[in-house]
Amino acid sequence: MSATAELNRRLPGGRYIGGVLQRIGLDGRGLVIAIPTIWLLLFFLIPFLVVAKISLSEAAIARPPYLPIWEWSDGFLNINLNFGNYLFLLDDPLYVAAYIESVRIAAISTVVTLLIGYPMAYLIARSSPDRRNILLMLVVLPFWTSFLLRVYAWIGFLKANGIINNFLISLGILNEPLVMLQTDFAVYVGIVYTYLPFMILPLYANLVKLDEAYLEASADLGARPATTFFTITLPLSANGIIAGCMLVFIPAVGEFVIPALLGGPDTLMIGRVLWDEFFSNRDWPIASAVAIVMLFVLVIPIMLLRKVQAVDEGAS
Amino acid sequence: MSEGNATPDAEPRADPWADPHAVPFLQVRNVTKKFGAFVAVDNVSLDIYKGEIFCLLGGSGCGKSTLLRLLSGFETASSGQIIIDGQDQEGVPPFARKTNMMFQSYALFPHMSVEKNIAYGLKRDGLPKAEIAARVSDMLSLVQMDQFASRKPHQLSGGQRQRVALARSLVKKPKLLMLDEPLGALDKKLREETQFELIKIQESLGVTFVVVTHDQEEAMTLSSRIGVMTEGRIVQVGTPHEIYEYPQSRFVADFIGSVNMFEGRITEDHEDHVLIGSRDTQTDIFVPHGISGVVGQQVAVAVRPEKVQISKSQLHDMRNTFTGKIDEIAYMGNSSVFQVLLDSGKRVRVSQSNRMRSNEDTLKWGDRVHVGWHDDAGIVVSS
Amino acid sequence: MKRRSRFLLFMGVFGFVFLYAPILSLVIFSFNESKLVTVWGGFSTKWYGELFRDPQILEAAWISAKIAFLSASIAVVIGTIGSFVLIRFARFRSKSLLSMMITAPLVMPEVIIGLSLLLLFVALQGLIGWPGGRGMLTIIIAHSTFGAAYAAVVIQSRLVDMDLSIEEAAQDLGAKPVRVFFDVTLPVIAPALMSAWLLAFTLSLDDLVIASFVSGPGASTLPMVIFSKVRLGVSPDVNALATIIIGLVSLGIIVAALQMSRSKRSSAN
């Protein structure tokens, strides 16, 4: 029995509603599919089209602060596509530099996160199952506390009279405080710190499936531990490495909070540029164009992530 | 089923499949199921009668589980017809079918107690509470699980879960119960005990069983009839005895038990006997009955290892005897299996039961022996 | 072999110190008498008192809690239906579109999600006069949408692991599909729904960027208030707030862990 037929039976007047639904091709199944689909279309996909549209319009002092793309005047449809915003992005060295800077900072942070996260993931994966769960919980726990407050904690650590400087000076290692806050270094630390769990979890999930017999077989065949690591473990965990790196790299490129709180005035990251264009300059078309270009920058990493995730799903 | 097996108060009855007037309870007519280009079930036709335990036997991927899912309504046939108790099942969803299924994984609801699991189907029928309680407790005692009524599935052993699954699938008194590898998850010892219990329950309730299994021993013990499946087709239907003793094809002979296969061609075709020339034996093999075939046709003679006799001395009163030497001996406790290398180069398996604890005349590795079989031991299979 | 494990141990200790030292410092200095957050001036709980006397923070916390509660609930509903449709339904026309849309928010920078939703709300306002200004409602919609993506990941993996024959058994025993869903599927995936809800709740409580874009006057969430405070430099009452949050989260995790080990023990018997 179809859900519509069920509806007919149960509701007074349900026959009419059921009939209407059926006529527009919606049965119970269709309705169930429609709920998440329509929600996401409306609040996820269509917004992007709006952004794309506004990125092609001209800024103006108005509410909302841009001119419409299409307009009816004298019975004609006037379409004013304004590619000026994109040309402006390309022309102004500030934006180009911000994109390059974002990718550079995100890439360096990702590599550092990998270097710290891989040994940790390996250690956890090779622990006894009981200890493994505790360690994993310890990795995830900071994630459940406020991201903003964890970034904030680093201000106290890194500033001129902060914990690190006070400690080093009291030991007599330093005479003058090191300038750490409001530098690129602080941004690296912030990104590595907040995204470390995103690196460790996929690496762990991958490494824990690695059969120890491979490593024993390799040792048995005469490979030293280092050789085994580089010829067996590393290649077999490639998917975990890619997934972890992309999960750190992609959000890091668009990061706003970390450069805003830990970075200096000259730490140009694109998320921050977009924020300033929007909130300070109120230039919505430029902000939209910045977002669209950022999406294009991220297309390749996102595809890479989807690919390794699809491979993982296929394998399990 | 022989008379001796029937329940005492029942009329001795003939096998329904042998009776041309009997109406099958379940009819499968030319059913095909395709998944894309893959044909999982290929034009299968099958009649199953009331009170049978019918086993669908085959290796993994032979289509037996798909056929079962077609019967229970979880898959829809690409073409063909399934009729249960006179009713075409086309378009009838699983929840509206009068059949039930016992799942291979048992599929007990993990969040419900044993009692609630068994009561679930009755509640869906909207039966009064008192009747549900009565029928659940009847079922619990039938499968001897009374003390475990309030346990959750994860608190039960594998054997106990199997009983609950059986009770749950029987409580609605289905006329047809489908069982997907019902004993597959049990260890060997428990499996053997449970087999007989399953037969007892089936006989006491008079339910028709369709069982899917890959285990030939299980199929042999449980079933009234077996349908052997391969590559989506049913290649032979028959009683366990027929399937074992009279396989109609090379595949069935090979799949059920072990067999020696002698390849050859028909050299002489008479009304009452044929001769088959085979490179495997050098001399012709004698088959004491006529077959449908022509001279020169490629055939094979299948002989079961336990039907082959082995001796150091000449075997008399046998037409099919050959010589060779013992190549390998495997001692299995109740029997021994010999591998004999015939002078033709063909290897023959011979199995001999160990009736005596020790034998003066023990056969040893390397002994020259005669092997042979009685005229009616060989079966001619063509394809 | 020995050397490698010593290296691993060192990296492990370093990693966990790195993860926890900042959190620990937040807690310690929340009890600092001195206003200088990083210089110890004696034990005091005065910043907690200050925190609870700050109406702005209290109001923002209440708004954030309401938003997080509602958006987590909506996110779980959308995430559950979406996951169920994707995992259990045979092919349908918009399947790959739905699958793309439900996972994409996971890898989308927050600034883009925030900007795009804001522009949508503005455009909708111009077209149909809805949502009638920005505030809690728009934040709830935004948080439900990206919360649904995270919820879907958790729920999908549970649905994939779930033995399909349990649902088939219920159907076989006479339950119609809707009944099967409520009788069998939902109870079986309930723990996953709970984790999904908690995840969406936490993400909503945590979000600064998206909320900043889509919120309007009068709807400042807790992260927005903290951010504006923190931008001006460290302040000890933020440490006190952080300590309270860390305390609540740790408590929640400990309770969950105990619950899990108890259910594991009972299933082992």
Image (cartoon, rainbow, N blue to C red):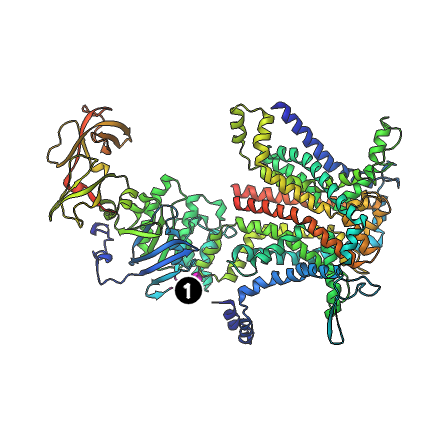
Res C95 seen here: yes
Residue B367: in magenta span: no
The answer to which of C42 and B26 lies nearer the viewer is B26
How many residues crowd around disc 1 within 10 Å: few (fewer than 14), some, or many (20 or more)?
A: some
Chain containing mark 1: B
Residue B97: in magenta span: yes
C158 left or right of A196 in image: left
Residue at 51% x, 24% y: name it. A221
Q: In the image, is residue A35 above or below residue C237?
A: below
Res C63 seen here: no
The answer to which of B29 and C157 lies nearer the viewer is B29
Residue at 14% x, 48% y: name it. B290
Q: In the image, is residue B196 above or below residue B30?
A: above
The answer to which of B267 and A74 lies nearer the viewer is A74
Q: In the image, is residue A51 above or below residue B296?
A: below
Q: Secondary structure at mark 1?
A: loop
Residue at 31% x, 54% y: name it. B204
Report the predominant secondary structure element of the magenta stretch.
loop
Q: Amino acid at mark 1?
A: Val
Residue C87 x/y as whole percent: 54, 54
Residue at 33% x, 56% y: name it. B44
Residue B368 x/y as whole percent: 19, 25
Residue B334 x/y as whole percent: 26, 32
Residue span colored magenta = B89-98
Q: In the image, is residue C155 above or below residue B309?
A: below
Q: Which residue is mark 1?
A: B92
